[in-house]
Image: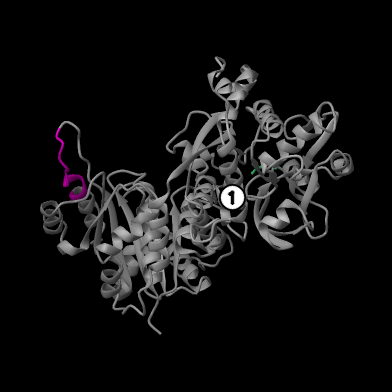
């Protein structure tokens, strides 16, 4: 067997370039040539994982099967490469330092000075290699967060330089950088990329390939200039322009032979070429004809570095996956639930949507507005999908308005409500009392048993499923009977029956009303859409066909 190969992907000029999509696309291409590939995201934060970072700051917290709270890029890797990743695939500065300091206290350095180089860089290299081993990958892609030149990621670049120094034939450096087209000039400028490559050079790193991100394709002249000034062959300068769908990126890279060039440089020969399924996928995305409008109701407010859609990227992608297979392009609108608190009449605007989703969330902001929206979706028979918090708040809504449990609530919001229909999982309470917040939720994949002849069982087409979780609260079993006798169906539960996993309204009450305690969005892949999302879009599509009256549309309150 060949030695394991490592491809480092760094960013230049600006962040938010779509480096993750580039890394994931390269992974897809290499897999299509018959190699086993894994991908690691390196984040520069001192946080041990992404679980303690606000999604508005950092983007979505993506949860893996083994319960890691990670960066949204792991979601990109899983979706593009169709693999299941885990703890080894996410490295933060905090993890590295924590281990180095643990070893220092355990006298594992045996009296040596513990220094950034080599001890911190060794730990980084160890983790990178370990991920390749754990995932049994022949090729490991390592994406560095941030951009070259930031103090906080210098040691990671240094680790990559050392790896290249030790085994040059096994290491590749790919630099993804931005070519702006200033409006005032109207032409693409390559100088910022040249400068970021100079920064790399100053750290002893020469890129083997440059991926130029820009609003438009890179022309021949600029490609040649970049090659000349950055010391690479013109064919190693890859154009990665904006596209309608991120899923087109692997094909754009393939057209420039990226997979083959990388293999050549690593001394590998392709074992096969198989991008057929991906080409079919992209063709079906490009073919979609009908748009349907989906409302995503939640608490939304000003964002930091990341945009709102980054905070829910897996939900957005899962809905899209569910649509493409049936020629549908779901159009998502973010609705701030606080609107319905200040003016409940506005909730009628939901009538103009084909479906309503309430995604995961925490805290009290907008909660009453969300409950108003769920009530409206239930009463007006608008297809409804509640994800985690969306399931819990649907339970609260049902308890209050159908089971007549006045004052029903979740104890996350109200400490002692008259009817705590959602309450904290007992083990979770103990953790919070000890201030153990990081990485302590009910996390990762757990099995659920589905009840026979329910909507959920029919949609999944099987009786047992495994789904990923991230929560501290659950449906209070003391209320199960009351809720069930009022017509709520608990169609999925943990195998011991203790924890409610799925709630639904039966077909005679509603065309589509499902809430899941888990996050099905994390397992949806473009090539294998999640059945719950497909079913939701199918129901939404039907509603659109029968939809609105002119009167409703003309309502001045909307
Ligand atoms: N806040 C709720 C809980 O902790 C829901 C979490 C979520 O939506 N991910 O249980």
Q: Quadrant of ligand 1?
A: top right
Query: Where is residue 413 drawn, in percent x and y?
Result: 72, 31
- Which of the 4 quarters of the picture holds residue 473? top right
User: In the drawing, does residue 62 fall left or right of residue 391?
Assistant: left
Taking 214 as reference, is 86 left or right? right
Residue 400 against residue 30 in the figure, above or below: above
Q: Quadrant of the N terminus?
A: bottom left
Q: Is residue 57 visible?
A: no
The residue lying toward the viewer, choosing from 552 and 515, is 552
> Which picture quadrant has residue 397?
top right
Q: Label 1, on which residue?
A: 533
Quadrant location, the C terminus? top right
- Residue 238 in the image: state x and y as whole percent: 23, 58
Which residue is at 20% across, 52% downward?
Answer: 198
Ligand 1 under 8 Å from disc 1 Cβ = no
Which color mode does the image show? one colour
Judging from the image, what secondary structure is the residue with disc 1 in?
Answer: helix
In the image, taking residue 169 as reference, residue 525 lies left or right, namely right
Asked whether 44 falls inside the magenta stretch, the response is: no
Left or right: where 433 falls relative to 75: right
**Residue 453 pos. (x, y %):** 78, 56
The magenta segment: 185-194
Determine crowd level at label 1: few under 14, some 14-19, many 20+ residues with C-alpha closer than 10 A.
Answer: many
Residue closest to the eye, 241 or 86: 241
Q: Eyeballing the image, is 294 above or below 458? A: above
Which residue, as the protein is rendered here, is positioned at the far top?
556
Whether residue 313 is visible, yes or no, is yes
**Residue found at x 48% / y 28%:** 302
Nearest the eye: 122 or 305 = 305
Residue 548: percent from left, percent from top: 57, 29
Q: Main secondary structure of the magenta part?
A: loop
Membership of 191 in magenta stretch: yes
């Amino acid at each position: 067997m060949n030695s394991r190969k490592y491809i480092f992907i760094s960013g230049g000029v600006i962040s938010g370039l779509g480096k993750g999509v580039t890394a994931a696309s390269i992974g897809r291409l290499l897999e299509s040539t018959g190699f086993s590939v894994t991908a690691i995201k390196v984040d520069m934060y001192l946080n041990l994982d992404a679980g303690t970072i606000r999604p508005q700051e950092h983007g979505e917290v993506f949860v893996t099967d083994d319960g890691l709270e990670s960066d949204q890029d792991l979601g990109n890797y899983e979706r593009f490469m169709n693999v299941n990743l885990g703890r080894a695939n996410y490295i933060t500065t905090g993890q590295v330092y924590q281990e180095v300091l643990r070893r220092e206290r355990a006298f594992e350095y045996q009296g040596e000075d513990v220094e950034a180089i080599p001890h911190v860089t060794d730990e980084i290299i160890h983790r990178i290699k370990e991920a390749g081993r754990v995932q049994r990958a022949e090729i490991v892609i390592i994406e560095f967060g941030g951009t070259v030149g930031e103090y906080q990621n210098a040691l990671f670049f240094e680790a990559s330089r050392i790896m290249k120094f030790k085994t040059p034939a096994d290491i590749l450096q790919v630099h993804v950088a931005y070519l702006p087209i200033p409006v005032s000039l109207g032409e693409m400028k390559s100088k910022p990329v040249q400068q970021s490559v100079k920064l790399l050079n100053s750290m002893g790193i020469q890129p083997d390939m440059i991926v130029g991100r820009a609003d438009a394709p890179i022309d021949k002249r600029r490609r040649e200039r970049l090659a000349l000034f950055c010391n690479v062959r013109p064919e190693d300068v890859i154009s990665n322009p904006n596209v309608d769908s991120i899923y087109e990126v692997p094909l754009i890279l393939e057209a420039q032979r990226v997979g083959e060039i990388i293999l050549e440089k690593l001394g590998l020969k392709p074992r096969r070429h198989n991008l057929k399924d991906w080409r079919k996928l992209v063709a079906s995305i490009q073919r979609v004809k009908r748009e349907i409008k989906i409302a995503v109701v939640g608490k939304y407010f000003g964002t930091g570095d990341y945009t709102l859609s980054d905070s829910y990227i897996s939900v957005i992608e899962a809905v899209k996956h569910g649509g493409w297979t049936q020629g549908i392009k779901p159009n998502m609108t973010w609705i701030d639930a606080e609107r319905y608190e200040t003016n409940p009449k506005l909730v009628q605007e939901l009538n103009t949507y084909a479906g309503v989703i309430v995604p995961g969330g925490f805290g009290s902001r907008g909660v009453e507005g969300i409950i108003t929206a769920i009530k409206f979706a239930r009463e007006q028979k608008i297809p409804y999908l509640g994800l985690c918090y969306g399931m819990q708040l649907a339970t609260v809504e049902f308890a209050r308005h159908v089971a007549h449990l006045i004052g029903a609530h979740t104890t996350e919001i109200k400490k002692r409500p008259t009817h705590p229909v959602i309450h904290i999982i007992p083990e979770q309470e103990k953790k919070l009392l000890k201030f153990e917040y990081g990485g302590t939720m009910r996390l990762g994949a757990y099995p659920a048993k589905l009840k026979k002849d329910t909507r959920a069982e029919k949609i999944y087409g099987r009786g047992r499923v495994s789904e990923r979780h991230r929560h501290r609260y659950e449906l209070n079993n003391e209320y199960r009977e009351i809720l069930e006798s009022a017509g709520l169906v608990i169609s999925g539960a943990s195998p011991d029956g203790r924890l409610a996993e799925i709630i639904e309204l039966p077909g005679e009450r509603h065309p589509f009303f499902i809430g899941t305690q888990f996050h099905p969005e994390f397992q949806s892949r473009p090539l294998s859409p999640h059945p719950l999302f497909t079913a939701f879009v199918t129901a939404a599509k039907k509603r659109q066909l029968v939809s609105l009256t002119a009167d409703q549309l003309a309502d001045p309150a909307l």
